[in-house]
Amino acid sequence: MSGQMGDSHRRFLQTMMAIGIVDEQEAKALHRHCCETHNTPYGSDALDDFINTINSKLQPLFMQITKGMSEDNGQQYYALVNMAETDITRMSSDYADNELELFRKTMDLIVVAENGKASSTDILNSTDSMTTKKLKKSETEHLLNRFVQDKWLSEKRGEYTLSTRCIIEMEPYIRTMYQDQVKVCHICHNIAFQCQICENPTCGIKIHNPCVAKYFKGRAEPRCPACDDFWPHEIPEATEVRRPRSRSRR
């Protein structure tokens, strides 16, 4: 049962509307800051209830603050998402038709890639088969930078991946459009793109790198949790959750 919406909730929502997505520690710090600013009772374990109150008021607007995991570091994130539609058309107010087509092509490349990444070269080459107005190389590069700035894609050393915001917001679309290609992590059961794969041809489960780090930590011999075959991949170090930065009062 949701509580009463107050000024602290409104401040939290306004911040989420401005930045779109925050990690769990930032959300906790923002929650505390909003409560202290408006002299609202604060509980360190009350973030989800606080967000549920906001979501109850957002429901008629088909908006929601949703929680999801970063494939990169395993941290939990909160994103303000549009629930009215379940596909890329929710981006149509910000992008032209040919820009949306490039995003779809980029997503196609990322989903079918075994490592969950698409190179800038492959994305540039994909513009040759566009059915809408074709983009020049400079226009494509500028647009890719914009997708990164708008937090739909992430980029490292010329390779692009779906951002945490994109996976959280586009999950229904991804599961529907790529149901034969998309697999979920065997540990956390979220969609898995950047992950390790069991090399047993009769198994082939996927596990996110952060989930690999947590699952195999302290185990003498890494074995697949599904088929018990030896896990041949390098086990990454578990990422420590950082402490929230304190927010200065205004």
Image: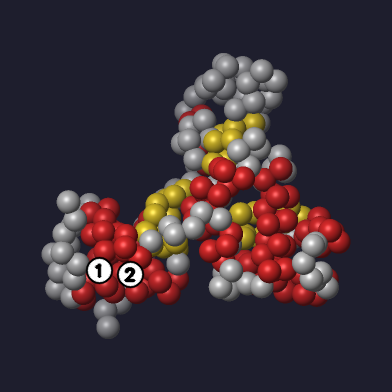
- Dot 2 alpha-carbon crowd within 10 angstroms: few under 14, some 14 to 19, many 20 or more: some
Residue placed at 60% from the left, 38% from the top?
179
> Mark 2 sits on what residue?
13
Q: Position of residue 113 (x, y in %)?
A: 72, 43
Residue 228 location, quadrant? top right
* Badge 1 amino acid: His
Mark 1 neighbour density, 10 Å: few (under 14) some (14–19) many (20 or more): many
| Residue type indicated by callout 2 | Leu
Where is residue 149? Give x, y as percent. 59, 70
* Picture residue at 68% right of the left edge, 57% below the top: 104
Q: Position of residue 91 (x, y in %)?
A: 57, 66
Do labels 1 and 2 touch, CB within 8 Å? yes
Residue 61 is marked as none
Q: Residue at x 58, y 73 (%)?
A: 94
3D distance between C-alphas at marks 1 and 2: 6 Å
| Left or right: 64 in relation to 2 | right
Which residue lies at the image location 62% right of the left edge and 60% below the top edge?
A: 154
In the rendered image, is residue 246 in sight? no
Q: Which colour scheme is used?
A: secondary structure
Q: Is mark 1 on a helix, strand or loop?
A: helix
Residue 105 x %, y %: 73, 56
Q: Residue 9 carries which label?
A: 1
SS assignment at label 2: helix
Q: Residue 26 occupies which quadrant of the picture?
A: bottom left
Residue 218: in sight, yes or no? yes
Q: Which of 121 and 80 is in front in this view?
A: 80
Q: In this view, does 18 lie above or below 174?
A: below
